[in-house]
Amino acid sequence: MILTVTMNPSVDISYPIPHFKLDDVNRVEAASKTAGGKGLNVTRVIKQLGEGVLATGVLGGMIGEYIVQELTKNEIENNFLKINQESRNCIAILHDGKQTEILEAGPTLTNEDGSAFLAKYETLLSSVSLVTISGSLPKGLPSTFYRQMVEMGRDKGIPVIVDTSGESLRQVLLHNVKPFAIKPNITELTQLLGREVEQSISSLSQALEDDMFQGIEWIVVSMGGAGAFVKHGSDFYRVTIPPIDVVNPVGSGDATVAGLAVALKHKQPALVVLKTAMTTGMLNTMEAATGHINTANFSQFFELVQVEKI
Ligand code: ADP
């Protein structure tokens, strides 16, 4: 079983409004509401791949209840810490070929909430064989929180994949106990290193030689339609993907993490790990729903991914 962590989940509301009018009334005919947050996208794709998955994190209030209902409806096992504050809504207005987003910050957690979650996490660790941590930390928790979770995993010999950004990612990387895998994109890499990283083999391999990445088994730098650049131990790989019809790229990084998690859980060889992660990312871009893949297309696209060792 894979444990997915979503510390600040949301209900993602999408309002298609073809001609959005500012400072006026806009009526919506077909609003869609789904359980969101990067970790829940990862969760759904793992489930679609037929793998056992347990979703955890922190939620509360009516919105939290809705998230639990949605997960349960989709037969996704879940065990979240419930707090007495309301989880957040994230609204995307789809208008005039554009997407305007309104993102609530969500609850501010107390130290007690943080400790209560870590106690739950410690218990859940005993029944899983791999952990994914995705997305940002809620307000109130220290930026070292994920780093602590990585260490708790490592203490139990459980590999932890971390997909976050900013200070909490930096804290994870500066620690001597390393995550098993990370999946930054080029923007996140640039932010981490404080210097421009380009989409070239020389720039990327130089970036990943930085001390902060030493000891991480897998570093998958995803590059949208250009595939990925990967460091595995001391090996580098360039992974390329075929051109595809993109319907909605939102959540493809999360789908990539899901593929990575499932392949790593099964201790697949490097070639299969990379092809699986790219295929799930691509399949997500081909669907309208975020964090959703059509598994019927898996083998067809898996065959088209090319992995070149550098
Ligand atoms: P993130 O959302 O984390 O920035 P990416 O945009 O790099 O992640 O996407 C992750 C993966 O999804 C890519 O490595 C690729 O496999 C697939 N993907 C994303 N965008 C496209 C695209 N435009 N065409 C084909 N595949 C894509």
Image (cartoon, rainbow, N blue to C red):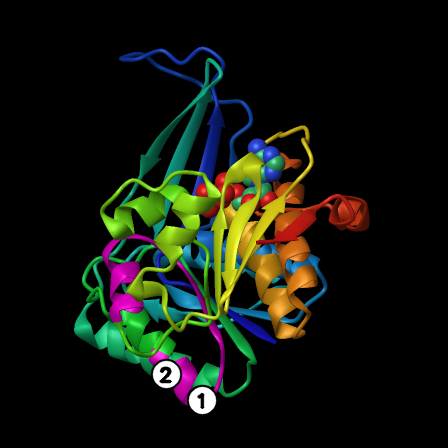
Q: Residue at x 23, y 57 (%)?
A: 167
Quadrant hosting residue 173: bottom left
Residue at point 40% right, 79% down?
121
Front residue (pair 195, 133): 195
What amino acid type is highlighted by mark number 2?
Met
- Direction from residue 142 to residue 14 in the image, left or right: right
SS for dot 1: loop
Q: Position of residue 154 (x, y in %)?
A: 41, 83
Label annotation for residue 44: none
User: Which residue is nearer to you in this view: 252 or 139?
Assistant: 252
Q: Image height check: is 158 above or below 60?
A: below
Quarter location, residue 273:
bottom right
The magenta region covers 151-174
In-image side of 133 versus 274 (left or right) = left
Q: What amino acid type is highlighted by mark number 1? A: Lys
The circle drawn on residue 156 is 1
Q: Which residue is mark 2?
A: 152
The reply to whether residue 49 is visible in this rendering is yes
Q: Is residue 136 magenta?
A: no
Q: Is residue 159 left or right of residue 120?
A: right
